[in-house]
Amino acid sequence: MKEKIKEFVLGLGVDDVGIAAVKDYKSTRSPDLQSILPGTKSLVVLAYKELSNCESENMQIAMGGRLDTLEFARSSNYRVARFLEREFKAKAMTVPPSYPLHMSYETKGTVGDVSLRHAAIAAGLGNFGRHNLVIHPTIGSRVVFTAVITNLEMSSDPPATEKLCTDCNICVENCPAHALDEEGKTDDMRCLKISQPYGIGSAIRFWTKFAEGTTEEQKKMVKDVNFWRLYQAGFIGFQYFCFSCMKSCPIGQS
Ligand code: B12
């Protein structure tokens, strides 16, 4: 069964796929998978190479490349879930690459319902680097994941035991937010401020100032680049303005 699933996934053009038995998925901060799909027994984890767009200083091109990856990832997720249901009469549910996310004041949208990094590690698709991203044995750090959880009983693929991070510290030195200074923990708020600068915080600040401004100040504010970027982020959904830890990592680039 595992081979048939992998053949199907790779046939879609997905870069790699791994399978994890539910007992090997260990994410302490995310909810129990049984609360999402009662009877979950395994996860099929899909790996996609990030496009070279992430290297561009042009943030429209960089984020556009990510949106292309996300669109392909979401459609691959759907096809894999339907394949499991059709071929094996399984129950299957897709895990989104990023949003929607549980939103609350407590978590501030920083905890996924299924942690895809922990899922990828359990499925043998890599291990954590100094940047707290999962490094894939051949793709390197420029990789994103999705998953399909299912009630099919399957064993885990062998773990990637070889340490893939070389501790070169380039990611730490290149992080403009200093979000990686503490080993083993990303400072989410520092990262968010630089990587998603046009989120809810910026919108509140902008519109509060706008509401309190004089007509002259308001006219000036709509000419400001922040207004136009907030407007765009509003309909894109969210927009990354930083890919530094991914793109600066030399692993998999030679
Ligand atoms: C919310 C979120 C964010 C938040 C919060 C990040 C965070 N600290 O978890 C913000 C906005 C800051 C963010 C930033 C980024 N994100 Co993000 N994010 C997510 C999301 C949606 C949920 C993550 C989550 O649940 N975190 C909470 C729990 C799981 O984390 P945790 O248990 O506390 O573990 C943390 C540490 O304890 C540490 N850790 C845990 N165990 C261990 C073990 C060892 C040995 C080590 C060293 C570390 C370590 O790693 C975690 C990072 O802080 C996932 C998608 C998903 N559903 O998983 C993508 C995801 C993690 N993001 C991703 C990416 C690529 C990014 C960015 C590069 C932004 C960008 N331009 O794409 C940066 C990288 C930041 C970084 N270097 O850590 C990818 C990572 C892919 C990969 N190769 O690992 C994911 C998996 C999305 C995807 N579909 O692939 N992200």
Image (cartoon, rainbow, N blue to C red):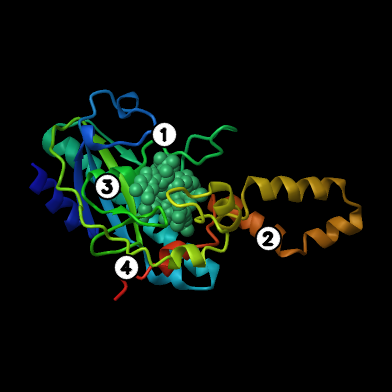
Does the beta carbon of the residue at mark 3 sit less than 8 Å from ligand 1?
Answer: no
Task: Work out how far the residue at label 4 is from the one at label 1, CA to CA, in angstroms.
Answer: 28 Å
* Figure quadrant of residue 131: bottom left
Q: Is the residue 162 above or below the residue 33 in the image?
A: below
Residue at mark 2: 228
Q: Residue at x 8, y 48 (%)?
A: 3
Q: Tell me if I can see residue 71 in this picture.
A: no
Residues 219 and 110: in front is: 110
Residue at mark 1: 29
Q: Compare marks 3 and 1 and give the one earlier in the sequence.
A: 1
Q: Compare marks 3 and 4 and give the one earlier in the sequence.
A: 3
Q: Amino acid at mark 1?
A: Arg
Question: From the viewer's perspective, is 124 left or right of 69?
Answer: left
Query: Is the C-beta separation of discs 3 and 4 under 8 Å?
Result: no
Task: Work out how far the residue at label 4 is from the one at label 2, CA to CA, in angstroms.
Answer: 36 Å
Task: Work out how far the residue at label 3 is from the one at label 4, CA to CA, in angstroms.
Answer: 17 Å
Q: Position of residue 232 (x, y in %)?
A: 61, 57
Q: Under tag 3, what secondary structure?
A: helix
Q: Under tag 2, what secondary structure?
A: helix
Q: Compare marks 3 and 2 and give the one earlier in the sequence.
A: 3
Q: Residue at x 87, y 46 (%)?
A: 212
Query: Is the C-beta separation of discs 4 and 1 under 8 Å?
Result: no
Residue at mark 4: 251
Q: Position of residue 78 (x, y in %)?
A: 29, 44
